[in-house]
Image (tube, helix red, strand yellow):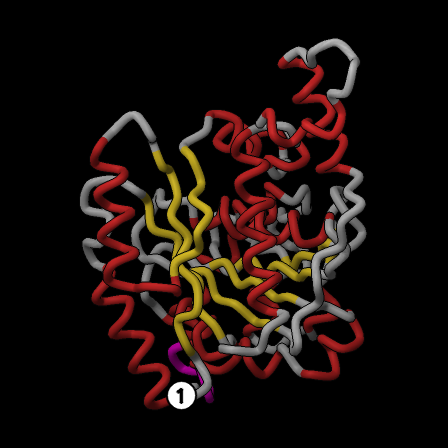
């Protein structure tokens, strides 16, 4: 962290850890840097059927980091638990206009979008508990796999003016996740740096291939984010090395460390960038968001 403050040292007294963290927090919340806009709007499904891998945490914090740096971002909460809605401070009690009503065709996307109190650039379509029964209801519907795609019209997204759309999936490979894969252009997979990290990943990759073959030929796995890294263990380094050797440049250089602050933030209805902007977790998600933005500005995908 000391490198961050090199320009401010001069002949002034040494910075204390508290002062450094305060300065970092100010830079996070009031950044001078604007991240580049993507060549084209990016619609990304964040998926992993394993629970507890940092999927929702990564969705909301990447979205918040991009929004704080001048990009407009929409998060679609497709998990009945509504954790992404909670972290963004969005009301999601039963009866709130939500993604459930969008999927069953009762309302349009614009009817359900809310703005997070953490940034005017950060939008969210909340999930309510009503979504828990949606998988059963969708089974009998026409074009059941593409209900979300039909709602994400170019006209609606242009009206919102969003640069990025993140779709947060439930930890399963059911119809909700299939809807997310059909609606997206890209898949982002968070993988925790822990034992059994790659277990079950083959099934997810097979599903992505099936969706690409039959429902959405433009879908591709473009991003893998390593999460929950604990530098004290050799295992974390081994997992990171294995993932990088298998997936190559798809894996972001930035690794998200295991962090108490990252875990605490949703309990306060906040992303970690709002809850503790000077923390290691916050800075890591900023770095990951910068990588995403730089890739999006290069159209090599």
The part of the image, by quadrant, that contains residue 8 is top right
Residue 129 lies in magenta, yes or no?
A: no
Q: Residue at x 73, y 48 (%)?
A: 68
Q: How many marks?
A: 1
Note whether 267 is above or below 149 in the view shown: above
Q: Residue at x 43, y 80 (%)?
A: 219
Q: Nearer the viewer, residue 209 or 36?
A: 36
**Residue tagged 1:** 215
Q: Nearer the viewer, residue 175 or 298?
A: 298
Residue 200: x, y in percent?
21, 58
Query: In which quadrant will I find the N terminus?
Result: top right
Residue 100: x, y in percent?
56, 65
Q: Residue at x 69, y 83 (%)?
A: 154
Q: Nearer the viewer, residue 74 or 80?
A: 74
Residue 223: x, y in percent?
43, 63
Q: Main secondary structure of the magenta part?
A: loop
Note whether 158 is above or below 270 in the view shown: below
Left or right: residue 160 compared with residue 95: right
Residue 189: x, y in percent?
39, 59
Secondary structure beneath dot 1 equals loop
Please state the extent of the stretch shown in magenta in the rendering.
139-144
């Amino acid at each position: 962290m000391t490198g961050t403050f090199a320009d401010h040292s001069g002949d002034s007294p040494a910075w204390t850890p508290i002062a450094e963290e305060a300065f970092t927090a100010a830079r996070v919340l009031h950044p001078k840097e604007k991240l580049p806009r993507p060549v084209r709007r990016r619609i990304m499904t964040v998926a992993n059927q394993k629970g507890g891998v940092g999927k929702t945490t990564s969705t909301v914090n990447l979205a918040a980091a991009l929004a704080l740096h001048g990009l407009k971002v929409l998060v679609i909460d497709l998990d009945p638990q509504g954790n992404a809605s909670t972290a963004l401070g969005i009301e999601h009690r039963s009866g709130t206009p939500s993604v459930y009503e969008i999927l069953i065709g009762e309302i349009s996307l614009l009817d359900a979008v809310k703005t997070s109190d953490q940034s005017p650039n950060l939008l969210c379509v909340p999930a309510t508990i009503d979504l828990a029964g949606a998988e059963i209801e969708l089974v009998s519907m026409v074009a059941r796999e593409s209900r979300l795609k039909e709602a994400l019209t170019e006209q609606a997204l242009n009206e919102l003016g969003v640069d990025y759309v993140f779709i947060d999936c439930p930890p399963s490979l059911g119809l909700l996740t299939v809807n997310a894969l059909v609606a997206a252009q890209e898949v982002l997979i968070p993988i925790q740096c822990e034992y059994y990290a790659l277990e079950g990943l083959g099934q997810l990759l097979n599903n992505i291939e099936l969706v690409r073959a039959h429902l959405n030929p433009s879908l591709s796995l473009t991003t893998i984010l390593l999460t929950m890294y604990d530098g004290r263990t050799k295992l974390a380094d081994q997992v990171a090395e294995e993932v990088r050797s298998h997936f190559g440049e798809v894996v972001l250089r930035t690794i998200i460390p295991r962090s108490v602050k990252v875990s605490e933030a949703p309990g306060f209805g906040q992303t970690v960038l709002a809850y503790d902007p000077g923390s290691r977790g916050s800075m890591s998600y900023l770095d990951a968001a910068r990588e995403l933005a730089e890739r999006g500005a290069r159209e090599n995908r």
